[in-house]
Image (cartoon, grey):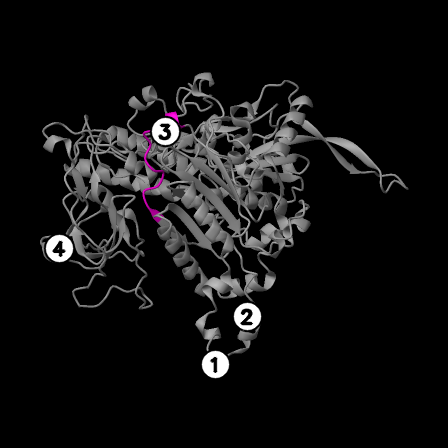
Amino acid sequence: SHLFCSSCTCTMSSSAVVVLFYRYFLPTASPSEKLGNEPTNSSTCTTVDEATLQFFQTHSSYYLPLLHKYQNDLCEKLGNLKGRILISQEGINGTLSCPSRNELGDYRKEMETFDLMRDLGVPPILNDGENINSDARDIPKAGGGRFFANIDWKTSTINRHKNNNQSEPFPDLKIQIVKEIVNTGGLIHVKDIQRNAGKEITPKEFHQILMEAEQNDGGVMTSSSGDGAGDNDAKKATQKEVVIIDVRNTFEHSIGHFLHPHSNTISPNDPSGTTDASRRNNANKNNQQPETTQPSKNKTPTPALNPNTVTFSHFDSTFCSQYSDALKDKKVLMYCTGGIRCVKASAMLKQRGVEDVSHLSGGIHRYVEQYGNSGFYKGKVFVFDQRVALDPDSMVTCNANDGDGGDEVDAKEESNRGEDIVVGKCLECQKPHDQISGATVCTVCRDLILLCPTCKSSMNEYHCRRHSLWKNSYFTFLERYSLEELQTQHGELKNLHDVTYVPVKEHKNVRRTLRKQMDKILARIKAFHDGTATVETNAKRRCRTCFESEEVCDGLCWGFWRSLQSPYLTKDDDDGKLEPIWDIKVGDRVTPGPNWNTLRLGSRCYSAPASGSRKKRKRSDDAVGQCTSQSTCSDNENRKVGTVVEMKSWATGVAVLWDQCITPQGEKNESKDNVVAIRQSDIYRWGAVARNGKRMYDVKLIS
């Protein structure tokens, strides 16, 4: 496969085929030469030409909505394919579930034959026969815009026996137009990939490098130019240390990762819980270099480096900026789930002067298709759908190198397969544990974490490794704490704010979070002094996402876990049948309903900022629908009113756009520049099922 023709990984369950694919939109004739890869075949080199690509980028505002419609129509035509697709000016990134291989084959065929100019035409402004402007002379011909041709479609299988009760990985189809198909905050442009991306290597090459490192104290032999006179063609062999970097997020790394045959000499893992900026600042104060160790002579495998990122957009600022200098004399191997993140990650490192950077073609998926649990990857593979995580052996296929993928074959019979390899550890007791769940998230950042049932049962709220210093002082729900406990929490948070997270410039967001929590605690303390608050010693544990008690929600109410939450019904509940969901459609008018949670969603009514406050308000979860009206919610006249703009089948919910508030003077609430602020819709539960089997409605229809 070719780097910019991308990769696709397909996994079959008992009910569906799941396809992961991407492609960066770049001319297909030049990248392999620039990156030193093997030349592509002639058909690959003629799929996208410079003229068509430039025309597409110039007129992307016209073509992107059409590409959105093309994908939506295609998925519906082929039998309601489901999943997630991102489209941008730089490329396409998607995951789809297909009912069978037939639908996947039809989708591939349509994608392979797509041509931009032939199928989407020319912007009307350039195609007006009476008003042809100068740009029309640059309209490219059809044939050079096959943006989806030669994607490397690959398939693998999952074990039927373990997944025969599994529902479809995706409940619906969602297609979005975005700025980047892999978000870097604009740091890496698609053209930077063409200039700076690392070398793409096959799973076999990746494996062979690690095999050699295993035999050579963690290093491999490389050739460099000779130095003597008349020695222009001479080469001398030197040994380079191999460093493996996991480009994925921390929760993905925690349940499965590659093992370095020896010891990585660079260690970004810091149990203190402070940010990378803090560690870098402290190292600079003491004239220290980033933490490294001497190469190990023993053969104890160690996990690939975990950059400790919550999202990929932090990779450059939290890892590359600190460790690029220490990597300049190393042979760097990078990997991610399917290969797409490594393309940009390798460019980030190379832009910082790290020359010997390679990344795994097709990512972990492609590697375990060939090696399963017998290779250097150990543990489970996290996937962003209802399967959650897959065992490597279950993904092994026949003909893994075949672009069409192999038929569904169990590489090892269930009876002959050993127990699953567990590499994950409980964050508290460090015992083996790899069951990741949407019900176990950090109360500060909502990042997924690993906690065993025993440790989890003894805690009311959970903290990730990054926020381990906050575990005794930061809690979302304060009703169970006494006045003295709140005062202690406030003091500890203040110490973190004033002492730990400095300098200010490098910790603006963290310090803002701490101040917000301190203000929340002070408000609770004031309520105690006013006599309006009491300690709820037996307060039930609450879901961090929806704020409902554990009687109502088991924590599986967000992301793809929503459809995994199953109610337990009793015989008294209409013979165990769920009540039908209330009818609603786009355009209906709604107002806060029976299950509106004021703790999470704020007031049911329009409210005003504090009297005399001149601070600009910001939109937040607890300020949804607020405006500058000075009236209170004493009657229905002030209650929020909005319009349903989208149905959310994934969330069993609706997206609502609240009306703009009208002030007592009858004027719209506008900014100081007299420009009405851009409003966004908010998502609310509509028929979501509670643990007691009852449906919940955050909003209700206006009669």
Distance between the alpha carbons at the discs numbered 2 and 1: 15 Å
The crowd level at tag 2 (other Cα within 10 Å; few <14, some 14-19, many 20+) is: some
Of badges 2 and 4, nearer the viewer stands 2
Q: Earlier in the sequence, mark 2 or mark 1?
A: 1
Q: Secondary structure at mark 3?
A: helix
Going by the numbered disc 4, the residue's amino acid type is: Ile
Q: Are discs 2 and 1 less than 8 Å apart at CB? A: no
The answer to whether residue 475 is left or right of residue 369 is left
**Residue 139 badge:** 2
Of badges 4 and 3, nearer the viewer stands 3
- Quadrant of the snapshot with the N terminus: top right
Say which residue appears at 44% left-offset and 24% top-offset: 424
Going by the numbered disc 3, the residue's amino acid type is: Asn
Q: Quadrant of residue 327?
A: top right
Of badges 1 and 3, nearer the viewer stands 3
Pointer 4: what residue? 702
The crowd level at tag 1 (other Cα within 10 Å; few <14, some 14-19, many 20+) is: few
Q: Earlier in the sequence, mark 4 or mark 3?
A: 3
Say which residue appears at 30% left-offset and 65% top-offset: 676
Say if residue 180 shows up in the picture: no
Say which residue appears at 33% left-offset and 40% top-offset: 559
Q: Are discs 4 and 3 less than 8 Å apart at CB? A: no
Question: Quick one: 150 or 228, which is closer to the camera?
Answer: 150
Pointer 1: what residue? 131
Q: Earlier in the sequence, mark 2 or mark 3?
A: 2
Going by the numbered disc 2, the residue's amino acid type is: Ile
Q: Are discs 4 and 1 less than 8 Å apart at CB? A: no
Q: Earlier in the sequence, mark 1 or mark 3?
A: 1
